[in-house]
Image (spheres, helix red, strand yellow):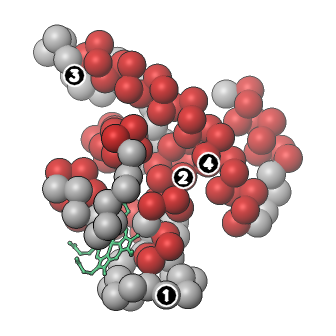
Amino acid sequence: MKQLALALLMGCGGAAADAGLAAETRADAGGSAVDDAGDDATSTADPCGDAPVVAWANGAHGVFIEHCQPCHASTALDRHGAPPDVVFDTRADAQRWADRVQARAVDAATMPPAGGVLEQDRALLALWLQCGVDR
Ligand code: HEC
């Protein structure tokens, strides 16, 4: 958290700064997300109870920037056929498409079309959709 606050103080504006922040904090969240998910496998408790909090700012946004926005950003230079209304610029945009993101990028892994998303990133996305989509 200290790291995030520092980065927020320093990273004022700019897509590059934003992406850097997301990637940096994502690395932290990713490690613990995978560990904790493993621990939860034997538990029947609320799946979100012990899960690390994956919010837009500390996890999901970075995954969208890295893996989805090249085609889906409203500013994408070449959408490669991605529908014009399917954009993930903001948390609200992503929330609007949450069900389809779950279906295409978590359940079926047909997005991005060519694959290449690390399991860790899919796990982050799944955790955000399940437990943190309102954050
Ligand atoms: C290389 C370009 C590209 C990337 C990267 C990409 N997409 Fe897509 N996306 C497309 C294209 C093309 C379509 C339309 C064809 C289709 O639905 O398969 C699409 C359609 C979609 C749709 C709407 C269709 C539906 O099933 O509801 C969603 C939601 C979606 N993508 C989510 C994602 C997510 C989430 C990511 C990142 C994990 C992602 N996409 C990455 C090209 C891309």
Q: In the displayed orientation, state which residue is furthest to the right.
A: 10
Residue drawn at 75 percent across, 57 percent down:
17
Task: Give the spatial CA distance, label 4 vs label 1.
Answer: 23 Å
Give the residue type that dot 4 points to: Ala
Q: Earlier in the sequence, mark 2 or mark 1?
A: 2
Query: Mark 2–mark 4 contact, CB under 8 Å?
Result: yes
Q: What residue would you read off at disc 3?
A: 46
Q: Is 25 rendered above or below residue 31?
A: below
Q: What residue would you read off at disc 1?
A: 78
Secondary structure at badge 4 equals helix
Query: Mark 1–mark 3 contact, CB under 8 Å?
Result: no
Task: Say if disc 2 is inside 8 Å of ligand 1.
Answer: no
Secondary structure at badge 3 equals loop
- Which of the two marks, 3 or 4, is nearer to us in this view? 4
Which of the pair 132/83 is nearer the observer?
83
Q: Earlier in the sequence, mark 3 or mark 2?
A: 3
Q: Earlier in the sequence, mark 2 or mark 4?
A: 4
Task: Give the spatial CA distance, label 2 vs label 1.
Answer: 20 Å
Q: Is 21 rendered above or below residue 80?
A: above
Q: Earlier in the sequence, mark 1 or mark 3?
A: 3
Query: Mark 2–mark 1 contact, CB under 8 Å?
Result: no
Q: Is 21 rendered above or below residue 38?
A: below
Q: Which mark is residue 100?
A: none
Q: Earlier in the sequence, mark 3 or mark 4?
A: 4
Q: What residue would you read off at disc 2?
A: 62
- Which of the two marks, 2 or 1, is nearer to us in this view? 1
Q: Earlier in the sequence, mark 4 or mark 1?
A: 4
